[in-house]
Image (tube, rainbow, N blue to C red):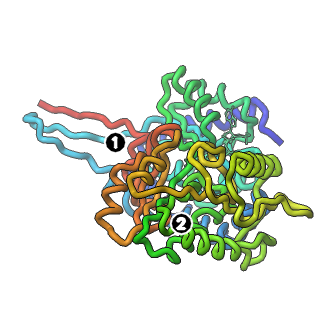
């Protein structure tokens, strides 16, 4: 049941009251809370994983890995917040001039369902470490995860109001953004909704971070280890049933190895058979919602009509559940539907290119700029291409992934601002100059 106005008011009030105390807490105290959150995540791993798989369908082993990653990230901030938030002295000729990192207030987090725990912890653990408090509106299809996250902070003996879930419909987010007690917004989700969040936050002049959609390129050069690249391609595209912002979507392959890569990729793809997500061995679960599967299938159909060829998958299976098979579209051209739109499900597009310059042009010919991968036997060449790719992260000979030590975020229509590492900590900090003559 959604929270009524009085309950939202109570939770916002608590978050704001808590902020007044938490902002003055010693960083060591915040570190202890985050360490206890990590412990509570590990203690509740089976329960939390069960909730994730029940509500959005990811294979249970992936859900367990998601919880562990949340714990690792809380551990990271718990171990490093003092160091990362230490005053920075700057030699300006004054007796003492330094930069200090103050909290800014209550942060509203509007979150998606695809990694129901990870997205939330990734966005909020650093904000809390700085001394902010959090209210969180989660996606409508993961209400039990949303409530479990609040319980998690309670189990970690966090002060009342440090982290609260708001069970509200999306239409009631704008008044929360405008509320004077809310200082900033962090949003993870689709590009169109990000645009409307940015309009609200901009009108209210509130700092915001946007983590939006992507259409990550995965470049395979002719000197790459093709079997290894194909295994990585399948892992990148099909884990979480392809419902990941940083999963590779456009496989841009040099012509002379394109057949070899496509054959190997098809073989790997056949190992991703859809099955019961509660079975430990399942590698491909159902998609999270029926409409998402139908949208993906419409994109696949449209791309085939435009001239692409289905190598594997591409048909909605009979029976219950929102299953969609691991699918490869070959001979996709850069202007086709699956190459221009975000495909948020298990469908890969192979685009064949003449050479590495052509590969780079195709990789950058997108409205998005989240992640990218380059596969090559020549590291120098891979790194040179990586520098020219317009994206928030480029991985050479590795699958794009987030890491608490490294910044995460996009450019272009994939959003702005950064999460994780020291960069995530500073997004919701007042970077304050203190100058003493
Ligand atoms: P979405 O439809 O944009 O929803 C995300 C969140 O926004 C949900 O909590 C949703 O609530 C809420 N929302 C929807 N419409 C709203 C509105 N008009 N005003 C305020 N809030 C609103 O995205 P999704 O389908 O859940 O997630 C998939 C998208 O997220 C993909 O595009 C994916 O690439 C992107 N994503 C990006 C990252 C990243 O880090 N860059 C990570 C993960 C996912 P309701 O559920 O109640 O509608």
Q: Secondary structure at mark 1?
A: strand
> Picture quarter containing residue 148?
bottom right
Label 2: few (<14), some or many (≥20) within 10 Å? Answer: many
Q: Report the side of 225 relative to 106 (left or right).
A: left
Reply above or below: 350 against 229: above
Indicate the position of residue 226 as horizontal and vertical percent values.
49, 74
Q: Residue at x 74, y 47 (%)?
A: 305
Q: Quadrant of ligand 1?
A: top right
Q: Of 364 and 138, which appears nearest the observer?
A: 364
The residue beneath circle 2 is: 258
Tell me: residue 40, above or below residue 181: below
Quadrant in the picture for residue 327: bottom right
Which residue is disc 1 drawn over? 101
**Is 236 positioned to the left or the right of 149 in the image?**
left
In the image, 426: left or right of 306?
left
Cβ of disc 1 within 8 Å of ligand 1? no
Provide the secondary structure element on which disc 2 rests.
helix
């Amino acid at each position: 049941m959604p929270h009524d106005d009085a309950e939202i008011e109570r939770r916002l009030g608590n978050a704001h009251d808590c902020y007044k105390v938490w902002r003055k807490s010693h960083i060591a105290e915040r570190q202890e809370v985050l360490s206890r959150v990590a412990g509570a995540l590990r203690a509740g791993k089976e329960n939390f994983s069960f909730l994730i798989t029940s509500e959005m369908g990811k294979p249970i082993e992936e859900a367990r890995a998601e919880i562990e990653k949340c714990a690792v990230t809380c551990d990271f901030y718990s171990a490093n917040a003092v160091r990362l938030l230490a005053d920075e002295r700057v030699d300006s000729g004054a007796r003492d001039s330094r930069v200090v990192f103050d909290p800014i207030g209550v942060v509203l987090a509007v979150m998606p369902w695809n990694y129901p725990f990870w997205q939330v912890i990734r966005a909020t653990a650093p904000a809390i470490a700085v001394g902010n408090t959090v209210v969180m509106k989660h996606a409508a299809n993961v209400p039990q995860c949303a409530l479990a996250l609040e319980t998690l902070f309670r189990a970690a003996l966090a002060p009342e109001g440090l982290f609260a879930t708001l069970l509200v419909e999306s239409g009631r987010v704008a008044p929360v953004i405008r509320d004077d007690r809310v200082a900033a917004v962090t949003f993870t989700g689709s590009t169109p909704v990000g645009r409307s969040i940015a309009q609200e936050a901009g009108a209210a002049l509130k700092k915001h971070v946007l983590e939006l959609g992507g259409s990550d390129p995965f470049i395979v050069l002719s000197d790459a280890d093709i079997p290894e690249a194909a295994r990585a391609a399948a892992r990148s595209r099909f884990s979480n049933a392809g419902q990941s912002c940083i999963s590779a979507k456009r496989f841009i392959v040099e012509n002379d190895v394109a057949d070899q890569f496509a054959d190997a990729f098809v073989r790997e793809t056949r190992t991703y058979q859809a099955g019961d997500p509660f079975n430990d061995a399942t590698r491909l679960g159902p998609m999270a919602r029926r409409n998402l599967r139908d949208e993906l299938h419409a994109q696949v159909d449209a791309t085939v009509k435009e001239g692409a060829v289905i190598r594997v998958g591409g048909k909605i299976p009979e029976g219950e559940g929102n299953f969609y098979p691991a699918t490869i579209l070959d001979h996709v051209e850069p202007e086709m539907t699956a190459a221009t739109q975000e495909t948020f499900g298990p469908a890969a597009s192979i685009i064949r290119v003449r050479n590495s310059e052509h590969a780079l042009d195709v990789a950058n010919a997108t409205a998005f700029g989240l992640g990218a991968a380059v596969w090559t036997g020549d590291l120098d060449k891979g790194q040179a291409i990586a520098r020219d790719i317009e994206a928030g992260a480029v991985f050479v000979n590795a699958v794009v992934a987030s890491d608490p030590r490294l910044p995460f975020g996009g450019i272009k229509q994939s959003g702005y601002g950064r999460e994780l590492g020291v960069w995530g900590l500073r997004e919701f900090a007042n970077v304050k100059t203190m100058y003493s003559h």
